[in-house]
């Protein structure tokens, strides 16, 4: 019974250990923290290779936006008409504050960061295959089986004692336990090492029979010599995973530039729409004054009803334009909130002075210089070049898959000594094996198609690289033209504002003298409103075009809070 007791204690201890490990390993918090740490290390290794990347990358959810920390608008906005008090109590945010909010709360920004995280998470899986991978398991199965037991009995027959054999059936209780642990690892030469240790126990719990134990330890090395052999072929999956993370980080660095420019351009667009409301309101008020004055003249017979009707019609048209401008402003403001990740019903407005601070800046750099800089700094072009290199490498990998399978196989196995002690291995009688495994390439259609596909993909990648270079050149040229055009448009709009203002003053004076016409005054007023709008539009377009040009140049440096630094090549004229 002592052997059975020893076995039972061993089984209980093994079960307790297994349950303890299972309970410790099943902590979801532990797994999450482990994944975050490993991803942080992977990103930290690649970050120095990518300029202007976030110093501390994390996908942790930010704290809720504290709206109450921003200043409050207290005055009415007369140009909102009946809604002039709608923005009282609204919190005012500057452009820099908008950038900070977007980096922290934008859904698009958070999704983009999570894409980087998931790519790094895939890399950790690819790396694990080239480290020792341990596995273990245990099982305990109890069973009962019928067993025939014979015994001799004595009976008295006709006064004589007769011995007879009687067979009886009884239930025998058995317990079979298996435990194993192993380790395997891929080699960067294409080979694989695997080893395992297993123990089997078989104990009969009734009848006092001894425990039977069998154990085995073995190791096996498989090394490809043709197909699958070589460092480049063996680590292709790992190599691609490493490069994919680098590509994703480069894309994210460029996304940060795009995102900051998008925030700025949308911010200015909202202010531009607000300015349109203001211009339309000023024009509407002037039309109302003109109509009131002309109605007074009409009562005295100095104006015709046709001329008065023309002014009234223009007033209605201007009022419609003002209503539309107000609606467009409110709609663009709500869309801006969504872009920042702020609930639409949050009472926020933008700082008017941001529009007043804009000015026309010119760039002291030629188009050819800009192209040369862009071809050296654009991170997306770096990705395209490296992807062309990837395509060439995959041609070699798929070509290797066409070779026959020829593997060198070596192994060793040791068993326990006779008895019930599982840890007493007999190394003197260890079994060694060595040899070759081969499989001829009688069916390689899938590999053939993969090889041909890799050749086509290589050609495509080459054309994609050529196209990327041309696209960058085109973006630089278009950006340069947009800057020049926006500056010319601003100059023209400024002249137009001055001319329209003088025309309005002249037509009002002529109308007072009775020598002007309603049509001329309407046209002058309309042109003045349009000139103010065009000047604001040209100013905003030039600012946005300048930011986009620096972005396309690859020289727009983004800070962790989303703010940017422009080069000192931009100076006031």
Image: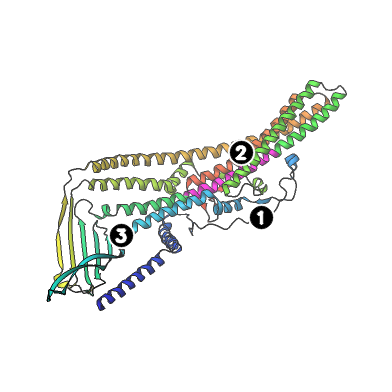
From this view, report whether residue 78 is shown above or below residue 520: below
Residue where numbered disc 1 is placed: 70
Mark 3 or mark 2, which is nearer to you? 3
Name the one closer to the observer, 75 or 363.
75
Q: Position of residue 44 (x, y in %)?
A: 43, 60
Assign the magenta stretch its main secondary structure. Answer: helix
Tell me the residue at 17%/43% (across/down): 442
Quadrant of the rendering where the C terminus is positioned = top right
Name the one closer to the observer, 515 or 121.
121
Q: CA distance from mark 1 to mark 3?
A: 52 Å
Quadrant of the rendering where the N terminus is positioned = bottom left
Q: In the displayed orientation, state which residue is furthest to the right.
A: 300
Residue 538: which numbered mark, if any? 2
Left or right of 395? Residue 288 is right
Q: Position of residue 367 (x, y in %)?
A: 48, 41
Sequence-first tag of 1 and 3: 1
Mark 1 or mark 2, which is nearer to you? 1
Q: Position of residue 22 (x, y in %)?
A: 38, 65
Sequence-first tag of 3 and 2: 3
Per the image, label 2 sits on a secondary structure element best described as: helix
Residue where numbered disc 3 is placed: 130
**Image quadrant where residue 144 sits:** bottom left
- The residue segment tinted magenta is 254-277
The answer to whether residue 526 of the structure is visible from this angle is: yes
Q: CA distance from mark 1 to mark 2?
A: 30 Å
Q: In the displayed orientation, state which residue is furthest to the front.
A: 158
Q: In the displayed orientation, state which residue is furthest to the bottom.
A: 2
Q: CA distance from mark 3 to mark 2?
A: 58 Å
Left or right of 478? Residue 494 is right
Per the image, label 1 sits on a secondary structure element best described as: loop
């Amino acid at each position: 019974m002592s052997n059975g007791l020893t076995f039972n204690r061993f089984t209980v201890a093994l079960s307790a250990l297994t349950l303890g490990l299972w309970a410790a390993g099943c902590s979801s918090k532990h797994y999450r923290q482990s994944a975050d740490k490993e991803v942080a290390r992977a990103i930290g290794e690649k970050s120095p290779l990518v300029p202007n990347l976030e110093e501390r990358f994390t996908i942790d959810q930010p704290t809720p936006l504290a709206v109450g920390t921003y200043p409050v608008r207290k005055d009415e906005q007369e140009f909102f008409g009946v809604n002039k008090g709608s923005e009282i109590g609204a919190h005012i945010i500057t452009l820099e504050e908008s950038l900070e909010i977007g980096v922290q709360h934008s859904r698009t920004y958070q999704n983009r960061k999570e894409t980087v995280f998931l790519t790094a998470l895939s890399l950790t899986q690819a790396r694990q295959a080239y480290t020792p991978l341990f596995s273990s398991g245990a099982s305990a199965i109890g069973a009962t089986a019928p067993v025939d037991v014979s015994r001799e009995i004595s009976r008295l027959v006709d006064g004589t004692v007769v011995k007879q054999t009687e067979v009886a059936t009884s239930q025998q209780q058995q317990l079979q336990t298996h435990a194993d642990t192993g380790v395997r690892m891929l080699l960067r030469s294409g080979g694989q090492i695997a080893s395992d240790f297993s123990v089997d126990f078989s104990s009969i719990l009734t009848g006092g029979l001894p425990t039977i134990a069998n154990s085995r330890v073995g190791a096996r090395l498989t090394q490809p010599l043709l197909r699958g052999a070589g460092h480049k072929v063996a680590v292709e999956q790992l190599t691609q995973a490493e490069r994919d993370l680098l590509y994703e980080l480069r894309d994210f660095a460029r996304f940060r530039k795009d995102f900051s420019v998008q925030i700025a351009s949308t911010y200015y667009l909202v202010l531009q729409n607000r300015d349109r409301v203001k211009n339309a309101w000023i024009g509407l008020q002037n039309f109302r004054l003109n109509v009131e004055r002309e109605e007074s003249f009409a009562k005295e017979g100095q104006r015709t009803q046709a001329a008065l009707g023309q002014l009234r019609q223009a007033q209605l048209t201007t009022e419609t334009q003002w209503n539309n401008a107000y609606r467009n402003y409110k709609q663009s403001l709500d869309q801006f909130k969504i872009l920042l990740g702020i609930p639409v019903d949050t009472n926020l407005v933008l700082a008017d002075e941001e529009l007043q601070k804009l000015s026309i800046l010119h760039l002291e750099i030629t188009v050819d210089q800009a192209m040369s800089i862009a071809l050296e700094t654009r991170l997306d072009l770096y990705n395209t070049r490296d992807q062309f290199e990837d395509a060439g490498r995959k041609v070699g990998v798929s070509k290797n898959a066409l070779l026959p399978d020829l593997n060198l196989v070596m192994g060793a196995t040791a068993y326990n000594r006779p008895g019930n002690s599982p840890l007493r291995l007999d190394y003197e009688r260890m079994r060694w094996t060595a040899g070759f495994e081969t499989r001829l390439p009688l069916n390689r259609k899938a590999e053939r198609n993969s090889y041909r596909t890799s050749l086509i993909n290589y050609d495509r990648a080459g054309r994609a690289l050529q196209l990327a270079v041309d696209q960058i050149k085109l973006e630089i040229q278009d950006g340069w033209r947009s800057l020049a055009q926006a500056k010319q448009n601003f100059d023209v709009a400024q002249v137009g504002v001055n001319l329209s203002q003088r025309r309005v003053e002249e037509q009002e004076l002529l109308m007072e003298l009775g020598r002007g016409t309603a049509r001329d005054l309407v046209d002058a007023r309309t042109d003045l409103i349009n000139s103010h709008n065009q000047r604001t539009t040209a100013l905003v377009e030039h600012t946005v075009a300048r930011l986009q040009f620096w972005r396309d140049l690859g020289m727009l440096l983004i800070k962790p809070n989303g703010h940017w630094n422009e080069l000192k090549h931009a100076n006031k004229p």
